[in-house]
Each structure stands twice: as structure tokens, then as C-alpha cells.
Amino acid sequence: MIAGEFEFFAPKTLAEALTLLHTHHSGCRLLAGGMTLVPVMTLGLAQPGVIVSLNHVSGLDGVEDRGTTLRLGAMTRHATVGSHPLILEHAPLLAAAARAIGDVQVRHRGTLGGSLAHAEPAADYLCATATLGARFLLQKHGGERWLSADAFFVDVMTTALAPDELLSAIEIPKQAAGSGYAHQRLRRVEGAFPTVLAAAQIAPRGGPARLGLGGVAPRPVVLDIGEVLGNGVTPAALDEIGTRAFDAARHALADLNGSTDYRRAMARVCARRAVAAAADMLAPGGR
Amino acid sequence: MKTFISLDVNGRKHQLAVDTRAKLTDLLRDELRLTGTHVGCGTGSCGACTVLLNGRTVKACCVLAADVDGQQVTTIEGLSEPGELSPLQQRFVEHHGLQCGYCTPGMVLSAHQLLADNPTPTEADIRHAIAGNLCRCTGYQNIVKAIVAASEQQ
């Protein structure tokens, strides 16, 4: 039993949910999968006066092919993100991130939008969506706006979402056929939250190449590594990428999972491994 | 504050007023007296409260009771008739896949989900499948043996 009293609403439509948010926005929390919110309410760390569950809103989940992009409903569960054929074909990095989260039960219930809106800096989806160039659809009663990852993620557990807005969809550009990718995740045991994350997404034939880092700064860091890989994935290029990751992690927050120095050192290791693994997936001479 | 919900638990329909502060574990254990669903940590870490929600395993301590309106829940009591064991439960007994038994209902439901999704799991598949269920007695070896045996006899 949760200690504090709160009002509970389970709207069936997005319009109803947005109206509730508009009416109650101060002290109101949106409940998605509840994998973080319910435990923190149990512990008394969050005491919202109003809970609006999104679990019964129709049309907020699922994956849609929009031509050059995929559009994912914010309530799409991790298990679906990790196994959906469209995601496996066009953005397999995101599927790999989803499959790495928590455990089976968490992946059945937890949602893409819930994790993104919570914005824990080392969360798998933050790094993956930023690396993939995702855009985020924020809706409120009577309005909506699209934001890039750079604009959406503001600080530790802080996004651009206003109190009366909800994250309803995430748009992921389809990655070029034949791309290489890797989701390199350092964690203490299976299911544990990552200490440091590195995500690499490398297009074939000199196309865009990006390295994302998580857990090394208040929000995900994305480095353009196309130029560094100009002569292929050479040992010198990997050294340079490791150094850039080490530099990008210079203000990494220290916690029980690791000091700033440890995270910097591991950012170098994870970045090198991610880029090497992604490059290995490219066809021979593919870069 | 109360809210009215209807739900199906182990094939039985219920309509009841639940406290909005109640979690699915409170509803199952205190209202419906289905005490096979155990509560370890209460914060989503141990998996003792694992149940099937619409056929997929979830941790019932992380689900609000008010939020399961119209849903279908299966608990450990729904896996076999009273006084009987399902083949999977029988393998846990034969292979000593439990000691204190506290984690066992959740462990069995996670194994049940695995075998439904993948009838021929490798040992690695089994270990990944029960990663969300903590056991502090067995060291997991006999649990894995029990699930292997259940998969071989399906």
C-alpha cells in the first residue's frame, strides 16, 4: 500500500488525458509502465496528488512506418521495442537498447516514453534515441511541438516537458541498409542500470557515423565520428575516438556505481568497443 | 479514496472497490486472499510478486490495483487445480528447486512464461529468463535444473 492519498484517473483517449493534465497539472504525475514511479511512491520519495494512468489510452502505443522514419507511440513497451520487425530492420540499435533494460518482467510493463520522460542520464533509451537522431512529439491541450533530442533532454532527470505536456510519440529516422551498430553497456550485474553506455551507429560508404555516450554527463552526448573514420576504422581512429569519449566524460557524476575517473576510463573503453563492433557489422570495405 | 474496477483473476470475474493507494499485490493478497503472490522488496527488484497480466509476467508490486481495471491476471494459484501441481511445479519439487520457498511462486511463473515463449530454451536462455527473480537460498543451480527438466518433458 502506498502511504499518501492521491486521486487516480484512467482516461481512454489522448484528448481526455490532455484535458486532465491541463486541469490538474500542478501535483499531477503521468503513470506509464510504473517501473520507477510506483516504487518511488512506495518509498515516499514522490507524493503526487493526482495520478493519470496512460495504460488505457488507445493509440498511444505501436510502431508505424512513415516512409523515411518510424513513429513509435510513447506507451510502446520495451518487449515490443526490442522485437518489432520494423525496428529490427530500420533501427536495430533501439531494439538492442530495449532488450538490455532490466529483466523480462520490467520489459513487459515498462515503456519507451516513460523511460525517456524520466530522463535518468544512463538510461539505455536516452543514448540510443539521441544517437539515432530521434525527434520527440510533445502534446498538450490545444497544442503540440516536435523537439530534437538535444532540445528534449535538458539535465539530470529533466526534460523540456512542461507540466501540462505529455510525450506522445518518438520518431526515429530509418538507418541506411547495411549500417553497423552497437549498444555497449557496462553494468555490475545483469539487469542492473548501466554505469556507462556507448552506442555506435555507422552508415556504409562514408555515410554518417555517430557515437552516443550515456552515464557520462547530465544528458546524452553524441559525437560525430564520420571524419575520424575517414581512413577506415584504423587503430589510430579508435584511439582518437577513445580520447574524445574520455574528454566528453570529464564532468561525469560520481555515484555508488563509479567515480568520475572510473566513468571517464570506462567511457574510453566502451566507445572503442562500440565503434569496433559496429564497424565489424559493415560489409567488407563498407566504410 | 476508492475506485471501482472489474478484473479477471485465474478465470474468476471480480468487481470491487479498491483503494487508489493499493497495489496489485495488496489487491491479490488482502482482498482476494491469494497469498501465493509474495512480496519481497515491494519496489520491483526481487520478482517474488511476479504474476501474469494479460498473459505476460509483470511485478505486481509495481502495478496499481486501480490500473488493472478490465485486465486479466493469473497468479500461482491459477497454474494448477488446488492440491495438484503443474508439470513445471512438479519438476521444481523433484529437482529441489526451492529451499525456503519465498521466491518460488514468482520463479515458477517466470519459468512458465519462458516455456510458453520458447519451449526449447538453452541454459543461458533460462538464466536470462529468471534474471528478474532473486533467490537467496538455492544458488539457482537446482532451479535451472528443474526448468531444464520441465522443458525436456514438454
Image (cartoon, grey):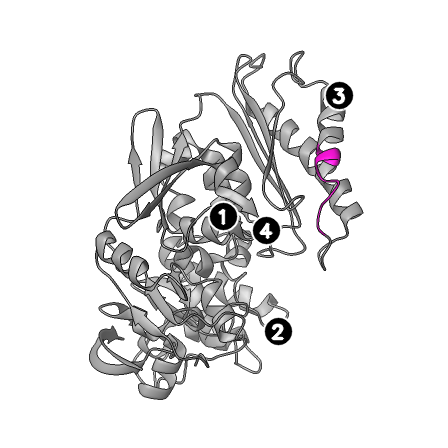
**Mark number for residue B138?**
2
The mark lying in front, picked from 2 and 1, is: 1
- Decide: marks 2, 4 in contact (CB < 8 A)? no
Alpha-carbon neighbours of circle 2 within 10 Å: few (<14), some, or many (≥20)?
Answer: some
Residue at image point 49% right, 48% down: A159
Q: Amino acid at mark 3?
A: Pro
Instruction: Give residue A31's position: percent from left, percent from top.
Output: 38, 62
Whether residue A271 is situated above or below residue B51 in the rendered picture: above
Instruction: Indicate whether residue A248 is drawn in magenta.
Output: yes
Q: Which mark is residue A235?
A: 3
Residue range (magenta): A245-253
Is residue A90 or residue B139 the one in the foreground? A90
> Looking at the picture, which amino acid does disc 1 mark?
Thr
The numbered mark 3 sits on a residue in which chain? A
Q: Which residue is mark 1?
A: A159
Type of the residue with mark 2: Thr
Q: Report, in whole angstroms, how far the alpha carbon at label 3 lies from the one at label 2.
A: 46 Å
Q: Point out the tag, 1 or 3, that comes first from the N-terminus.
A: 1
Q: Secondary structure at mark 2?
A: loop
